[in-house]
Amino acid sequence: MKRAAAGLLLGLLVGLGAIGCDRAQRVEPLPEGFVLVGERAAFARLLDHFRKLEGTPLARISESVADAIPNCQELEAVVPSGEISELAGRLQCATHAARMESMRTLRDEFAIAFALPSAAGLRIRGGIAVGTDGGLRFGFDIPDAGLPAFADLLLPSDELPGPPILSSTDTLVHARARPRGGLDLAALVPHASQADRLFRLKSALFAGAVLDGTWELASYVPQPGDRMALSALAVGFTLRTAAVSAMESFVDELRTTWGVARSDFSAGRFEGACLAQLNLLPELAPCYVATDRALVIGWNETAIRKALDGTRAHGPRDEGEVLIHLARFAKADARLIETLPGGATSPGVEYPWKEMAAIARRTHLGFRVDAQLRPRDPS
């Protein structure tokens, strides 16, 4: 009896597997280029949001696409060239053809699903949910196979990066991560290449031996008179003494390469150095200090002091996140424009969202990047 039951179960599993294989064989491969399927109503609402970005290419394209939406509940489009500007001429009512079957999983989760043009064997698929409050939620599925080498610097490891180090007040962009490839930038730079010669990325610091693999970047709203949005980078270390020694060696290499002088610098109780004469870009006079947890490198000493002022607002989550505060960009643009010669003026883009937040996680297929565009608070 037990043998018969086992045989029946085995036969059932084999039969289901055969059905699955047969079904998979009937699904046609996804067409090349940009592919889109989704609900007409959600797609129309999405275009309405994009049309609010006045003066941008996205607003102009959305205007033309909105006029071309066919009158049916489900839409689809295939743009072989991958050019989004051609979308208006490619929209049609969905046929539920077998070639779109591979989009079904995303389509079950999102009102709109899409696939981006493939590059080097990598096909990124994603979806968009359009909230009734004006918010947008995106999901991107990135296969592990075919990822370029530099992707290891961007995709997350299994170990969380932990809480932020830098100030989160008045940030334009604030990101914190622990990538699966650590911070071995030197491995990506060819020996004796221009990047190697100019910035000495083959130094002990960027070889990754003294770093713990975490990085954090913060860019701040410029103060009146600033010509740049000042930024700071924090890289975590395993041993503070070894990290400081490697950083000082890196500073000496830069000093020799560019013929500039090193000067001592401190921010509070943390000590470091500056290369005040390295004026390759506006207000660039890079400095660093070693805190208890990380080396903090700033655009100049003002950037370091801002990044370490201890103020906390809404920063990245401990599991790693990228935050872009869109509502602050108009103020930043206005201050930078004021510093241009001749009193030049240009209206900045007013975004209908206050911020974008993105986080990456591992999946059984590779990686999922989830992003949200959060609407502005009702005025």
Image: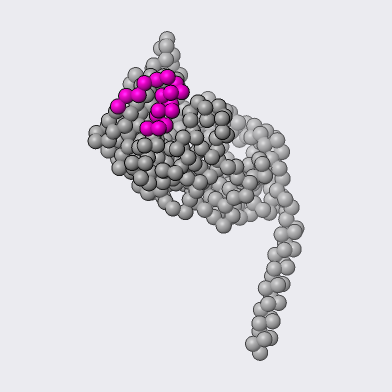
x then y, percent, for residue 276: 36, 21
Q: Main secondary structure of the magenta part?
A: helix
Q: Nearer the viewer, residue 212 or 56?
A: 212
Q: Tell me: 38 left or right of 332.
A: right
- Quadrant hosting residue 303: top left
Q: Tell me: 151 left or right of 318.
A: right
Q: Tell me: 217 left or right of 115.
A: left
Identify the residue at image location x=47%, y=45%.
182
Magenta-tinted stretch: 248-264
Identify the residue at image location x=31%, y=32%.
272
x then y, percent, for residue 15: 72, 72
**Residue 66 among those drawn in magenta:** no
Identify the residue at image location x=40%, y=40%.
235
Q: Nearer the viewer, residue 363 or 313?
A: 363
Q: Tell me: 64 left or right of 168.
A: right
**Residue 260 among those drawn in magenta:** yes
For the rendered model, the colour scheme is one colour
Q: Nearer the viewer, residue 48 or 192?
A: 192
Measured along the vertical axis of the image, is residue 12 above or below residue 310? below
